[in-house]
Amino acid sequence: MSIIDRIRLRISRSDGLLLLAIVGLCSGVLAGASNILFRLFTESGIVLWHPKSDAGDFEGLPWHIRLIMPIIGGLIVGLFLQKLSKHRRAVGVGHVLDRLSFHQGYLPWKNAIVQFCLGGLTLASGMSVGREGPGVHLGAASGSWLGQRLKLPNNSIRILVACGCAAAISASFNTPLAGVIFAMEVIMMEYTIASFIPVILASVSGAMLSRMVFGHNVAFIVPNLELTSLWEMPFFLLMGIVIGCLAALFIHLTTRVAQKTANWEVWIKCTLSGIIVGLIAIGIPQVMGIGYDSVNATLQGSYGFVIIALCLVGKFIATVCCSGMSMPGGVIGPTFFIGAMTGALAGIIGNWLFPEYASIYPFYAMIGMATMMSASLQAPLAALMALLELTGNPGIILPGMLSVVIANLMVSQVFKQKSIFLTLMTARGKELKISPLTQFLRRVGVAGVMERSIAVHDRQTSIAEAEKLLEETPRWVLIREDNVPIALMSANELAMYLVELKESEEEVPKQLDLLKIPANRQELSSVYLQATLEEALDTMDQKQVDAVYVYRTTAPLTEKIYGLLTRESIVSHYSYRK
């Protein structure tokens, strides 16, 4: 066995964590670099659209430019998407979850190019989307590409996808810890020790690259914020209820728009999104683009009640339309915007009602950001970690925890909603059903569990050949015909038959037919060396067999068999690990 094959097999096992961590670090570097390139491309695109103002400063544009820009951008993006196949149009976090659940983390690089180009154009034209969704897709695609190039086991490729996602979030917000939690909570939907270390290294590398290019500042400029009084806590509870209702409404309306427009031509949907954004932007230019400048203005206390209320309503409607009509952008940034405006309104009202107890409204805006993100994505820990890293203030966690948890309970328990990503996937005909058993089977590669004590032999054999075969004390014998394994038998049964044959008084035959001698035999199928236990079990169910042999193609029309896996061994491994 070659050194490369040994490395691949070791990575699939629990003792390959060091190697996986090194590959995860490389994945983080690739993901961070792709996100930096995407940000540079997006911001250069914005400058090309309106060179006389700062990047992202849509408020400084004349009203007719604000109207025309998203319409033209939507039309161009729609026409490009229209020419692509439905498969190639799939982008964003939903696409990543789909490929993880149904395709073992194999993300096509062509979809990533579509995301890079059209996602950048979407942002540059001022559509109400975020750059984090495209960034997560690019990061995941970077990790998946590296795993595929190295031909790693599929369970390792899944971890590299999570590494890329963590590095993407880390590079976008300069929040490495939030990137780790986001990858585990939203993408992998589980916490495992084997995944944590590679994901942490990837997240750190993404943050370091981002700081080298864009500096050490986080995405939002946050003032020193403090809780004035514990009497505010009921108000944060109420804010969690309100934002939870708003998040549930956001998920519901976005899903309804996606369902109603599912059969429309793509270019019509994108152009209509642009028209809606353009019309809103005539009076509320803050709804255009990512909107981080408006969020920062709110956090600095620069906006009044009326502007904040208008921004909230306008951004809510614009984001529902853009996300529901499948514009190639993200929803994480818009949820930050909507949450900040909602929290700011709550803070202003609180100051009116209880001026002696309420904090200034930027404090509420910051907590509102985390609450809306958490409720929409169903990611409470990721939101709280982002809140902590963005503010650098542990004191904000106490009211943040209360608001975040209440909002999540409102969405999941009261309104029975899943995250915006899973809900949109269901609306488009792909529903994820994740069970603990499925998660476990996806984490383990067949190479780490397979039985390697096997012998492969042709159906016809002589007594001498059979005895020589048993000298290596294999546990199983794979019987092949025309170089294809077709049946499985225990080596012990072959040995017992040879003993009985020698002790009998009958004439010993010159040739044995391994398919006809008295023994229990099983039919079997095959799985590739990179497969997970989930794939192996699915193959057994589809082929109605109880065993598979593990192989890899080493040359054209040449297969090398590495081991054997039975249904019983999978059950035993799960029961032991459980």
Image (cartoon, rainbow, N blue to C red):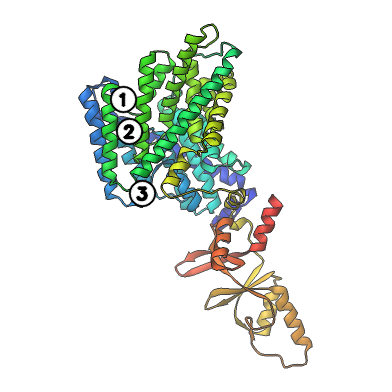
**How far across and down, in percent of the image, does residue 472 sit?**
69, 71
Residue at figure coordinates x 49%, y 25% from the top left: 242
Amino acid type assigned to the residue bearing label 1 in the image: Ala
**How far across and down, in percent of the image, does residue 127 sit?**
31, 32
Q: Which residue is mark 3?
A: 110
Residue at figure coordinates x 76%, y 86% from the top left: 502
Q: How many marks?
A: 3
Amino acid type assigned to the residue bearing label 2 in the image: Leu
**Disc 3, SS:** helix
Q: Of marks 3 and 1, which one's residue comes earlier in the chain?
A: 1
Q: Is residue 134 visible?
A: no
Viewer-side residue, 435 vs 99: 435
Q: Which residue is mark 2?
A: 123
Q: Is residue 420 visible?
A: yes
Amino acid type assigned to the residue bearing label 3 in the image: Lys
Quadrant of the snapshot with the N terminus: bottom right
Q: Of marks 3 and 2, which one's residue comes earlier in the chain?
A: 3
**How far across and down, in percent of the image, does residue 451 sit?**
65, 63
